[in-house]
């Protein structure tokens, strides 16, 4: 009898506690206070983080965030990052000096907390998929750590907003955000009404002879294809990259194939050649009609949620619907983009892929 | 043996018409014709050869070591082949031919090392067994090291996929690579079925019957290493087939190697072909073959052992 009552009390107490914590989670809003030269920010994990101003040294465990900091002109504050960012050929070209001092602090199997502590950063940026353990360890070192999710267009723009607040650089960020929003809307306005969407398949080389990887439903590549007025054949597959064989491709029989590569040793053009020369692919609709296109890559491929995704969107729209976007000159738009945000001449950048 | 052949041919024809793309046997479109002739047919032949090769290698080692738990990896061939492939993925990742070649060569190297070392650690079969285990562990640890250092975005998933095995992306050219070494392995072991019976009596009995045990042992190891290394180079690590198929065959035809050897070859080919059909057809995503072979092989082994135990008890 007694035991039952005690059990009931515990259950009620737990429920109250849970609902209270849920409520408090809802009420926290993004607020900035500059009284003691620290600002408070709410990140994607919903936690409020206090960051001392000014932020001079950043360690980014999120390669996409590092690339975006360079877009924002704040790349010189990044002292440690991931393999993707440290090896980024575009950053090396645009900011050769900065790129050299950037240290590799996250390995495939986790982050090197000691190495990060040695840098003694004012801020650590984590990805939403980073392990909680690393975040906890860094938290113990009293290093403020913000969690970002950049992997949808909306979240990408919100991430820029958060970063600009922390770095006290909201004016420049505003112009970047406006650029992305306006140009995205320009494309969407034309593609929203399209009824007849071609079937598009985006493939990456899996390094295993002739089996290829296609992006599953969580991946940004499918979002870009959709925004550009195409229907991605792989958008119902689970999770991230899926290995498929040519038989499945034959079943989908896509109208358009887009090849991508994240390595300059085997480019999207090489992959395109491999596909075009493989007898097994010759009767796939896209191959038969010659509609296999190589995604541009300037050191960073244009198809993932790094700064160039907006160029990827132009390119994708023009590739899928040349009849609608006939007047859109992707190369010219890219030239403006490089000039505006990186002060680089497009002629100085080596871009592989079908750009023209 | 006719029964085995008939069953294999049935599965072979069934495999031709199984897959993601539905093929109408009465009316071929050009697309389905390419899929049938340039994708499915080479893959089916490759999977069959690999299955037969692995099964025979497993049987050969089981005979050699007089131990039913011996599998194709017992002297380090698969571990060596795995390291070869992983190194090639790390350093020449964009040329699939290098991956296959390096894998094949490292498989042979591992077996050679194990054989040489066996002279240092003991006499005859026990020495070889111990050396094989050590070499296998050594190569496996190096694979682990390579995995740790691999790029997590593209190379690591490739290595993991490779280590679980797959016949995805097979074309006629891959068959060309496989054909010579695996044919030598398969035909060689089939020809050795009579000496196997004598070897199974034990070293001293075999010697007293006039069999040069040392030479036969060497030949068997070379043939099995050829089969395992080439099958692994093409398909990646394929678990269980080499262990389970000889047991199934033994249950069906008994212990006489003259019948057991060809039966094992057919069982291995049929079983791997069947598993590969599942791997490529069940989902839009290609499944790794070892996932399927273990899923089917492990319960099958228990079933066989249980039946044998019941038989022995009565």
Image (cartoon, rainbow, N blue to C red):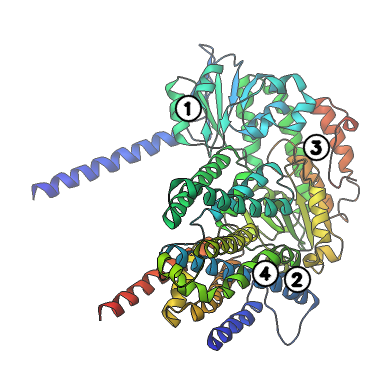
Q: Nearer the viewer, mark 4 or mark 3?
A: 4
What crowding class fits label 3: few (fewer than 14 Cα within 10 Å), some (14-19), or many (20 or more)? some
Q: Which residue is mark 4?
A: B43
Say left or right for B192 vs A177: left
CB within 8 Å, label 3 to label 1? no
The subunit letter for the residue under badge 3 reads A
Does residue A194 lie above or below B42 as drawn? above
Residue at image position (76%, 27%) is: A92
As measured in the structure, the alpha-carbon distance from the residue carrying label 3 to the one carrying label 1 is 37 Å
Residue at image position (25%, 77%) is: B313
Q: Which residue is mark 1?
A: A48
Q: Position of residue A125 (x, y in %)?
A: 57, 28
What crowding class fits label 2: few (fewer than 14 Cα within 10 Å), some (14-19), or many (20 or more)? some
How many marks can you see?
Answer: 4
Say left or right for B273 vs B196: right
As measured in the structure, the alpha-carbon distance from the residue carrying label 3 to the one carrying label 2 is 35 Å
Q: Nearer the viewer, mark 3 or mark 2?
A: 2
Question: Who is closer to the viewer here, A340 or B310?
Answer: B310
As measured in the structure, the alpha-carbon distance from the residue carrying label 4 to the one carrying label 3 is 37 Å
Provide the secondary structure element on which disc 2 rests: helix
Question: Who is closer to the viewer here, B65 or B148?
Answer: B65
What crowding class fits label 1: few (fewer than 14 Cα within 10 Å), some (14-19), or many (20 or more)? some
Q: Which mark is residue A298?
A: 3
Q: Which residue is mark 2?
A: B38
């Amino acid at each position: 009898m007694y035991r039952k009552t005690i059990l009931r009390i515990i259950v009620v107490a737990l429920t109250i506690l849970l609902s209270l914590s849920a409520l408090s989670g809802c009420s926290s809003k993004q607020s900035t206070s500059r009284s003691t030269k620290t600002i408070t920010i709410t990140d994607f994990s919903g936690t409020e983080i206090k960051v001392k101003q000014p932020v001079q040294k950043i360690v980014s465990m999120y390669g996409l965030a590092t690339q975006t900091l360079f877009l924002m002109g704040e790349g010189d504050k990044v002292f440690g990052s991931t393999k993707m960012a440290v090896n980024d050929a575009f950053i090396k070209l645009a900011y050769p000096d900065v790129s050299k001092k950037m240290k590799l602090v996250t390995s495939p199997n986790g982050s090197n907390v000691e190495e990060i502590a040695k840098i003694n950063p004012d801020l650590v940026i984590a990805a939403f998929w980073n392990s909680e353990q690393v975040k906890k360890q860094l938290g113990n070192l009293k290093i403020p750590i913000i969690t970002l999710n950049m992997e949808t267009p909306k979240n990408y723009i919100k991430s820029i907003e958060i970063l600009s607040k922390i770095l006290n650089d909201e004016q420049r960020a505003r112009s970047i955000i406006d650029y992305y929003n306006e140009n995205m809307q320009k494309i969407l306005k034309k593609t929203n009404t399209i009824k007849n969407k071609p079937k598009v398949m985006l493939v990456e080389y899996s390094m295993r002879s002739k089996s290829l990887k296609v992006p599953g439903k969580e991946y940004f590549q499918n979002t870009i294809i959709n925004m550009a007025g195409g229907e991605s054949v792989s958008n119902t597959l689970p999770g991230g990259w899926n290995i498929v064989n040519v038989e499945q491709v034959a079943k989908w029989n896509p109208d358009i194939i887009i090849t991508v590569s994240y390595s300059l040793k085997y480019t999207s053009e090489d992959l395109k050649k491999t596909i075009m020369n493989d007898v097994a692919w010759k009767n796939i609709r896209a191959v038969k009609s010659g509609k296999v296109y190589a995604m541009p890559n300037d050191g960073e491929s244009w198809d993932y949620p790094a700064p160039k995704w907006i160029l990827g969107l132009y390119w994708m729209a023009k590739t899928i619907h040349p009849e609608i976007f006939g007047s859109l000159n992707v190369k010219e738009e890219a030239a403006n983009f490089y000039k505006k945000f990186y002060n680089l001449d497009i002629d100085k950048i080596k871009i592989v892929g079908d750009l023209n | 043996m006719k029964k085995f052949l008939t069953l294999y041919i049935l599965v072979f024809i069934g495999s031709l018409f199984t897959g993601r793309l539905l093929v109408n046997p009465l009316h071929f479109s050009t697309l389905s014709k390419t899929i049938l002739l340039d994708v499915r047919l080479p893959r089916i032949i490759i999977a069959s050869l690999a299955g037969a090769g692995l099964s025979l290698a497993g049987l050969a080692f089981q005979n050699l070591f007089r131990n039913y738990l011996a599998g194709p990896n017992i002297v380090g061939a698969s571990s060596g082949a795995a390291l070869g492939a992983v190194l090639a993925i790390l350093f020449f990742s964009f040329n699939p031919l290098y991956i296959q070649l390096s894998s094949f060569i490292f498989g042979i190297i591992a077996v050679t090392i194990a054989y040489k070392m066996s002279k240092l650690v003991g006499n005859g079969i026990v020495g070889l067994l111990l050396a094989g285990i050590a070499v296998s562990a050594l190569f496996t640890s190096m694979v682990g090291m390579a995995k740790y250092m691999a790029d997590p975005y593209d190379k690591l998933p490739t290595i993991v996929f490779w280590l679980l095995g797959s016949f995805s992306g097979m074309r006629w050219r891959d068959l060309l690579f496989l054909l010579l070494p695996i044919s030598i392995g398969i035909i060689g072991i089939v020809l050795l079925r009579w000496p196997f019976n004598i070897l199974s009596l034990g070293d001293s009995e075999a010697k007293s019957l006039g069999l040069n045990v040392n030479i036969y042992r060497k030949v068997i190891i070379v043939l099995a290493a050829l089969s395992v290394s080439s099958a692994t180079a093409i398909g990646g690590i394929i678990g269980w087939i080499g262990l389970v198929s000889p047991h199934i065959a033994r249950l069906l035809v008994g212990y006489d190697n003259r019948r057991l050897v060809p039966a094992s070859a057919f069982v291995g080919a049929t079983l791997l072909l069947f598993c590969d059909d599942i791997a490529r057809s069940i989902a839009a995503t290609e499944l790794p073959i070892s996932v399927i072979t273990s899923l089917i092989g492990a319960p099958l082994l228990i079933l066989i052992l249980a039946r044998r135990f019941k038989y022995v008890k009565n």
